[in-house]
Image: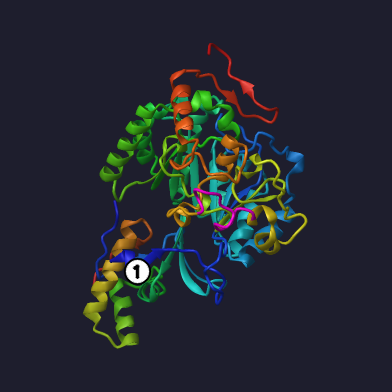
Amino acid sequence: MPEDHAADIQLVSRAGEDTGRSHGLPLAVLAEITHRCPLQCPYCSNPLAMEPGSNELPTADWLRVIDELAELGVLQIHFSGGEPTARRDLGQMIARATEAGLYSNLITSAVGLTRDKLAALVEAGLCHVQISVQGAEPALADRVGGYRGGHARKLEAARWTRDLDLPLTVNAVMHRQNLHQLPAIIDMAVGMGASRLEVANVQYYGWALKNRHALMPTPAQVEDCTATVEAARDRLRGVLEIDYVIPDYYAKRPKQCMGGWGRQFFNISPSGKVLPCHAAETITGLEFDSVRDRPLAWIWEHSKALNIYRGTDWMPEPCRSCEWKEADFGGCRCQAFALTGSAGSTDPACAKSPLHDHIFALAETEAGEERNRFIYRNLSGGTEEAGPA
Amino acid sequence: MRPEIAPESVPRLPRHVKLRHDKARDRWLILVPERVLVPDDTAVAVLSRVDGARSVRDIATDLAQTYHAAVDVILADSIALLQDLADKGFLAVTEPRHA
């Protein structure tokens, strides 16, 4: 019965406007306030060309932007990065978000947190914490993150989060070299007191594309992973909610990326650029508007980069006449660009794409080659892992 | 484990659950981690009375008077609604009061 009493929100326009549009009021924003991060995960969702600290939007601009977000109808703000706690003014931003009526989430690696730091953020109005994990035990997890001692710190930060009575989401990014630990990661998430677990297979753009050789799972691993998630969902009903993302290369239908390009969400980069998703800067040739130059409300309506792939009018065949076009909105533009060189072409993750069989075969071959050495993410363009390939 | 909602339970919304009237969309919303829920009128009527002080029975009695309805029916509906939110981790209870 409760389902009838509180349904998930659908696309909504401003009160009184008609809703048959390519976009509504934005529900949530991903505020990537910095690209600086103590971890060096080889699948980082930040672009290869990261913003140095000197290009970051100053505090006063962020505070103004937070007010504009609330005015525009945004409901939730996800403070992310890089590592958002690397900015000393994070507490100020959360306090302003709270004042403006926004719901604040912290998406963190947690390695830079202390109990006092976290308590101060809670005091400022933080509502929810999401901590990333790289594995189920320190040896692998610290190797993937390129940060010795990181795993233990995450477990400690999870305890503080629960002590401070905040709900915890654990985000586990999965790939060939850690998928065997998924059952243990699920148990660990329960032990950490998480109410949600995101089992997110790596998506291949930016850093992950550069590391695809070391990350791509085998089809058998993906099958096991799906079975593990399904069994755990049954077993842990009411204890742990599990969100699951399978790797696109092995999918038959593309994912509904970000709920549709520029439809309900956007991302603000460390320098203030407004992007339809965190990977959009990998698409060359798009020009993004900045909150330094324009009001957010103007950008949401008029930005060329947001409007170009909104709705369904931009679609080529076979998308244009596809019965699923309103369900997946044509999948992922960043992936189309990465694999075809054109962001406006059919997402090769879709079985209707002429490239679909090719990328499946490519993934399978790459997964079988066992080239396991990572290229770590950093501001100088990446560093290859030491040791034998 | 999740709390069990009884007539004498005193429910409260935890810090990570916000019931809010949204001006831009002109509707009531429940904000929770990574999701936004749209409560119906019944849920809004019940949840706007959840204050960490009143029991479910107090709330049902108030609603019965406001809407001229049978208190038993409203009590049963309220318990079902609140139990569901509690099962999802979106509702807490303080110590059950003894009548």
- For this orientation, the residue located farthest to the left is B72
Question: Which chain does the numbered disc 1 sit on?
Answer: A
Could you tell whether A30 is left or right of A55 in the image?
left
- Figure check: A102 above or below A249: below
Residue that lies at the very extreme toward the top in this rendered image: A388
In the displayed structure image, the side of residue A373 where residue A232 appears, left or right: left
Residue B8 included in the magenta stretch of the image: no
Image quadrant in which you'd find residue A307 = bottom right
Place of residue B43 in the rendered image (x, y in percent of width and height, measured from the top left): 37, 72
Residue A99 in view of the camera: yes
Which residue is disc 1 drawn over?
Answer: A5
The residue at 54%/38% (across/down) is: A109
Of residues A320 and A42, the one nearer the viewer is A320
The residue drawn where x is 64% and y is 54% is A308
Residue A354, percent across and down?
A: 49, 38
Q: Residue at x 36, y 61 (%)?
A: B91
Quarter the N terminus of chain A occupies: bottom left
Q: Amino acid at mark 1?
A: His
Above or below for A79 versus A71: above
The local crowd at label 1, few if under 14, some if 14 to 19, many if 20 or more residues have their Cα within 10 Å, is: some
Residue A316 lies within the magenta run:
yes
Most common secondary structure along the magenta stretch: loop
Residue A149 in sight from this viewpoint: no
What is the x, y in percent for residue A340?
58, 36
| Residue A374 spot, x, y in % from top left | 55, 22
SS for callout 1: helix
Measured along the vertical axis of the image, is residue A317 above or below residue B74?
above
Question: Quick check: A164 left or right of B76?
Answer: right
Residue extent of the magenta highlight: A308-320
Of the pair A170 and A200, the residue shown nearer to us: A200
Q: Is residue A143 above or below residue B46?
A: above
The single residue placed furthest to the bottom in the displayed view is B68
